[in-house]
Amino acid sequence: MASSKKEAQNILEVAIVGAGVSGLGMGIQLLKAGETNFKIFDKGHDVGGTWRDNTYPGCGCDVKSSLYSYSFEPWAEWSNSYAKQGEIYKYLRHCATKYGVYPYIQFNTSITGSAFDEQAGLWNITTADGKTIQARNVVTAVGPFSAPKVAEFKGAEKFKGKTVHTAAWDHSVELEGKRVGLIGTGATAVQVGPAIADKVKNLVVFQRTANWIMPRPDRNIEEAEKALNRKTPLNMKMNRLGVYWFNELTAPFLILKYDMFKAQPEKMASSYLARKVKDPELRKKLTPTFKFGCKRVLVSSDWYPTMQKEHVHLETNAIDCITEKGIRTADGVEHELDVIIYATGYEVRHTGSPIDAKGIGGASLNDKWKDGSEAYQGISTAGFPNLYFLVGPFTGPGHTSVIAYAEAQIGYVIQAIKLRQKRKLKAISVKPEVEQKFVNTMDFRSEHTVWKSGCASWYLSPNGRNNTLYPGLNAEYRMRIARFNPAEYVLTASNGKTVKPKVTDHISTGLMAIKAA
Ligand code: NAP
């Protein structure tokens, strides 16, 4: 991957937007492939993305760390089988340091727009401080969880106490001995609730929907095991493989809507609830009314015990309004509070472009995606050459680690970038009919998923369509994108003419796929 010295000073080979798990992974793999003419732009002050920004008490990952880590960088230092935010953030900084990515990152830089120059085959990228950067290829790696969703309640501005959203935790807010309200019972709430319960005077949890919960088989990793892992990375690789395939086996139960895949997990989760919660009234409140997997299945061993603490109250009456003193529910009760915690999730983007992009003929990606984002393999969209998305449309993880998707996509994008360099192409753009066929497959498959079985979740766009999660196994997706197939793309030569892929192009992408496997 050689770029000429002159170009290296002016034009980036690759501009990456976002230094979270996927953007950082992209930077690492570019360096491994010998490409140094790239830059990662991030609006924050460090790598880590969501793991840098989410610092609420109890924040951690509900995917085992052995899988929620890069496949090429197993880590012997995890303290638990399920890592907490601080350790994941530390791990990502460790990776950025070890692989020498920091010098390639420009922090505190928000990308505000990008426009494709067809004559030059370049993207002109603008930053919030008015600068323009030129790049041959752009990779967006912005992730779905960067904007907190602040649920709007009548009277919210009147509240005299403190308000905090989990995604922008304010560490100056005192919880010790306070009366605290927690709005939400999703993946975040089940982490923050148990983490603060013993500090506060009393905790009122406002639940709109009860979720399916499975116990979290967490355990401490002792020094002896860490030492073994340091000495024998193979041990960690085998562990990862075991967790990966276990998750893959659970996929049909979490993804498909058919009763044959629902009966057993619902029985297991119901029996876990019955074992942990003896009070029938509380148990009823905690029993979900939708199919297992329709919303994200939560993994927590301390949510049910927390709900049974003397000073914790699970409120299932709807929130009517927020008052000066606290929260009033639909039954007319005013819950007096000192602090309100919003664990109400994120504004997950279903429509519009992750960065404002103008492609061929000035076409706007925001317009193209106004009714829903779509991309071939979740990675590229017709009319927007040399632009790639990591963890883009249709490729969120329903049952496993997001890193398993991101790593496969990074390999695919690198093949495309290398092919472009080898053939000195001006542009590589997916064929519209290829993209449409893929989108049709995703829509068809989504009809068989439990996500569309009648509950509301961030998985679905407002019109009820799934363009968020991959409706299949990760292993199948990886095979699908293992090789970048140039025949599926329009290749534009430096003279502006469309050219066909050569046999050698197929061979070289095939060899790269084999090497990466
Ligand atoms: P979420 O799943 O969207 O949950 C938001 C919660 O707030 C839900 O209980 C929701 O109720 C409630 N809510 C929202 N608006 C409300 C309103 N107006 N009135 C009352 N309740 C309201 O958000 P999240 O818990 O932050 O999780 C989002 C995603 O982040 C997860 O699915 C997961 O992918 C990721 N995450 C991952 C981890 C991890 O361990 N890897 C940890 C945390 C988060 P309804 O259910 O009724 O809508």
Image: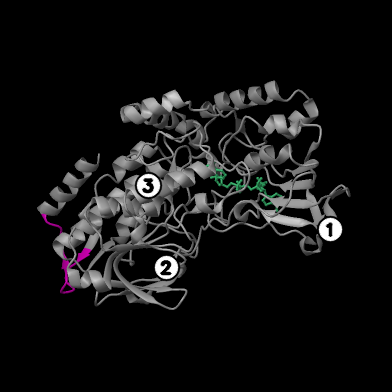
* Along the viewing direction, whichever of 395 and 246 lies nearer the viewer: 246
Q: CA distance from mark 2 to mark 3?
A: 33 Å
* Along the viewing direction, whichever of 282 and 96 lies nearer the viewer: 96
Looking at the rendering, the stretch of residues picked out in magenta corresponds to 491-502
Mark 1, other Cα within 10 Å: few <14 / some 14–19 / many ≥20: many
Q: Of the numbered discs in the image, which one, if any, rests on residue 95?
A: 3
Name the residue: 43% across, 35% down: 77
Q: Position of residue 397 (x, y in %)?
A: 46, 43
* Along the viewing direction, whichever of 153 and 381 lies nearer the viewer: 153
Q: Secondary structure at mark 1?
A: loop
Q: Which residue is mark 2?
A: 365
- Tag 1: residue type? Thr
- Tell me if residue 129 is in the magenta stretch: no
The answer, for residue 287, to whether it is visible in the render is no
* Along the viewing direction, whichever of 206 and 61 lies nearer the viewer: 61
Q: Position of residue 184 (x, y in %)?
A: 68, 46
Q: Secondary structure at mark 2?
A: helix
Name the residue: 77% across, 64% down: 157
Q: Which residue is mark 1?
A: 323
Which is closer to the viewer, label 2 or label 1? 1
Which is closer to the viewer, label 2 or label 3? 3
